Amino acid sequence: MSKPVLRVQDLAVTFTSYSGGLLQKKERSIRAVDGISFELSAGETLGIVGESASGKSTLARAILGLIPPNRGRVMWMGENLTALDEEEMRQRRKELQIVFQDPVAALDPRMTAGDIIAEPLWTFYPNMDRVQVDERTRGMMKMVGLLPNQINRYPHEFSGGQCQRIGIARSLVLNPRLVFCDEPVSALDVSIQAQIINLLKDLQKKLGLALVFVAHDLSVVRHISDRVMVMYMGQAMEVSEKRALYRRPLHPYTNALMKSVPIPDPKLAARARRESWLKGDMPSPFNRPKGCVFHDRCPYRIKRCEADVPALRRMESGDWVSCHRAEELDLSIRNDSSDAMG
Amino acid sequence: MSGKTDKNEIDPSVEEVFAAAMAEQDIPGRSLWVDAWQRLLKNKAAVVSGIIMTLVVVLVVVGPFLLPWEADFTDWDHTSSPPSLETGHWFGTDSVGRDLLVRTLEGGRISLLVGLVATLVSLLIGVTYGAIAGYYGGMTDRVMMRIVDIIYALPFMFLVILLMVVFGRHIVLIFVAIGAVNWLDMARIVRGQTLSLKNTEFVEAARACGVDHAAIIRRHIIPNLLGVVMVYVTLTIPQVILVESFLSFLGLGVQEPMSSWGALVNDGAQDMETAPWTLIFPAVFLSVTLYCFNYIGDGMRDALDPKDHL
Amino acid sequence: MKPLLEVSALEVEFDTPDGVVKAVNGLNFSLDEGESLAIVGESGAGKSQLVLAIMGLLAENGRARGQAIFRGADLMQMKPQDLNSVRGKHIAMIFQDPMTSLNPYLTIEQQMTEVVIHHQGLRKDEARAKAVEMLRAVRIPDAEERIRQYPHEYSGGMRQRVMIAMGLLCQPDLLIADEPSTALDVTVQAQITQLVAELSEKTAMSVILITHDLAVVAEVCERIIVMYAGEVVESGSAEDIFYRPQHPYTRGLLESVPRLDRAEDRLHAIPGNPPNLQDLPTGCHFRDRCGEATERCRKPPPLWVAEGGRMSRCVLPMEGGRLAAGESVRADEKSTSATAGEPQE
């Protein structure tokens, strides 16, 4: 494994809201990101999976400096991004890019596709002449699978999948080293999802990018990731190498996520009965469970889980998990018909 | 393989279509403004109002040159005479014998000019102020908006009278006075829009691409505000014209021999019983203009449907 | 046994600034009592529009033609008041985003009891009891207390369950769910899909599930209709569609679903973009994205049929099927769809 380009160390973001009247101010805080650490090397893809309130989108923005973190460091190529001022950070954006979840909302409806892709060029290379900018823009369009003659069309004239391609082209036009994909396919039809995932994978290989791919679905992330991190309520439950995770998840929440993926097979689906594996609903971020943040919904919990917060620790396999019972539980996905996954 | 295929020929294969398309002309885009414009054209009330307004503007600008009378020419033979074709005074004359048609048209020039210029002043100040307050937020926003609130609380007439007293009844002062008070509403509206625009994904995307604040305001915020601003402008113009009329009513408006529709209405109101035409004609012009701007404004608001932009 | 809902020759058009757009083009299907049917297709395939047309909920610039016979009466010909009462009492509809379907200013109790009081004339306390019972049926914890809360105090998944509960209050014959779990978290999606599947099995209620995600369908539905560009391209039982898909589009959809139980390095994607309804390829509308398209596909594809509503609209022959009346596959003979004896193109 080559040297890591990105090192996130104990990153935390807390949102505080104030309520109450004039005399009595009540402060409530949400720990959206609660101490996340990971490393990423060039050419590697980290998949981050989590449901709503897991903090995955906040994490993306904190790493990219769009939201200031309350704690922790983000080391990029050996430099601490959290210590930079606004202007210095702005310069680093050439190397750290992001693709957004809502492909249409991420594009200014009053700008043409060409202008949207060219804007980063105008920003960082104001001396580039028109012809060069035009050439590069068309080149990017071709690279992401768009016909260059669409360059003067507006976002509302494109389909969702095409808008996402425009967004990807924009993020790559400055030759970044890292691209954060924040649920880039969640808003797209399943058949188009596959196209975009394949595209990202191809681009990564071609350009040697480090990718972070955020999704709410384990199946989506599988094809593109080398390692997968599972987040819940702002914390990392498990960080495992892909094949290991899908064969034998270490954390009960990962297991629950896997069981939630619908199986496109009527006989298997009937047998699976993806029953309420998880008790109840996601707790309110204002009322975090004490101890292990997952314990109130965990089918494997023991007394200890209610009071002790499990640390993210390294297992023999080299993967990380935060669960008191990680060694004794065997959550392997079996391939016989008796098991839910089939 | 050329880009064009004969309708009767068998269509080329997919790869050839792609290659042909690559060599083709760029496809022109259809911007949201064009969409909105087309929608506006379907709104009959707005279109009719637009036509009427254009006519009024043409009349008002060109008309006085075509008429034989000067605005301040007093025709002693025909004072307070009703409209007639024989006398040549199609709108009649006022108590001093001045031709009402010419006066109405020239008054229109002043009224419309006040409307446009004062609105322009209010636009420039209001949009800049509101966009900065909304975009930077925090303390800047709070301070700036408190200033707006304070000025808002001051009695408008008091300010205008004060300005008049200090600087005299100059027409430019009227533009400035009205504009200087009107920008407050514009600032509030622009600030509100900026706040919601600030939180859109495409603005966040621009920040993520390293675009600096000034460029974001210039390139992303302001163009997306224009729709709302334009609607507001069409509604502000009539408001301003009315304010000027009110000032004239109080005797603070334009000075003789210049006149505005408001001043004419004021004069006409005094002679209402003996020479009703002196009131009716300017009043009709004033009302029609106000109606038209309002219909156009409504039409624009519908055409720039929020579903489209944000 | 007569079907509960029988739709024939349904067409839906919209007036847009760019001209008339045909969202649904000659659709036929039927639904029996207690049956669960899925309508699957990409966005823009017309699946939502067809249901909105049947229910009389089309946007102003939309027009619908055809028949939708529900319990013996044609919904498309009904007067608005009659349609309204059918909508509340016999057919319930659930949409994608539960937050926009619920009034944020009213409590859940108010919104649920309003439905029951209006359609069944119950007293307030009776209505409340019924509402609580229904909330329990959809597994809302502490239903008695939570019924007094406002929509924003519920999570997305819970709101969707409330919508289902509201729909069930009047014991409808048919529940139409339009992408009910698409906007929800995966674990919540599983719960909602589970719930709909149970309801379909345990009650005599029929279900129409509209979605672009074939995987969800496998769990809930007995029959499936696959739509593309406003037309049905394939239909059959769940087993037919999943194990013996005939139409290249159906196969493409199945292959592009990422699966956890198979090791795949590369996802299969259907090339190209969802069709532009105003600029469809002539003949088979799918041919510009189909890996098996040939010269013959420039003509409208023939209809293959078999028992139980199994059909496929493609030049490729369907296993176990025969050509529908009036259809032909010879390249020199142009084929039309549906009625025999219609003049050739």
Image (tube, rainbow, N blue to C red):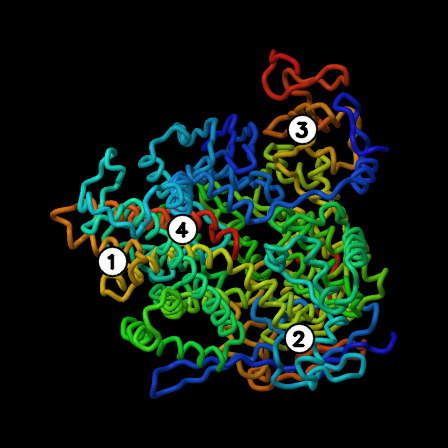
Is disc 1 in the same subunit as disc 4?
Answer: no
**CB within 8 Å, label 2 to label 4:** no
Pinpoint the chain carrying mark 4. B
Q: Earlier in the sequence, mark 3 or mark 1?
A: 1
Pinpoint the chain carrying mark 3. C
Badge 1 marks a residue whose secondary structure is helix
Residue identified by numbered label 2: A237
Residue A4 is at least partly visible in this image = yes
Q: Nearer the viewer, residue A182 or B280?
A: B280
Q: Determine the CA span between mark 3 and mark 2.
A: 48 Å
Residue A167 position, x and y percent, is: 69, 58
Q: Residue at horizontal 71%, vertical 77%? A: A321
Give the number of marks.
Answer: 4
Residue identified by numbered label 3: C313
Amino acid on which the number 2 mark rests in the picture: Met
> In what quadrant of the picture does the N terminus of chain B appear?
top right
Q: Is residue C14 above or below residue A319?
A: above
Residue identified by numbered label 4: B297
Amino acid on which the number 1 mark rests in the picture: Asp
Residue C129 position, x and y percent, is: 30, 58
Pinpoint the chain carrying mark 1. C
Residue identified by numbered label 1: C125
Residue C336 position, x and y percent, is: 65, 19
Badge 2 marks a residue whose secondary structure is strand
Badge 4 marks a residue whose secondary structure is helix
Count residues near mark 2 (Cα–Cα under 10 Å), then give few for <14, some for 14-19, many for 20+: many
**Side (left or right) of C34 relative to C245:** left
Q: Determine the CA span between mark 3 and mark 1.
A: 54 Å
Q: Determine the CA span between mark 4 and mark 3.
A: 51 Å
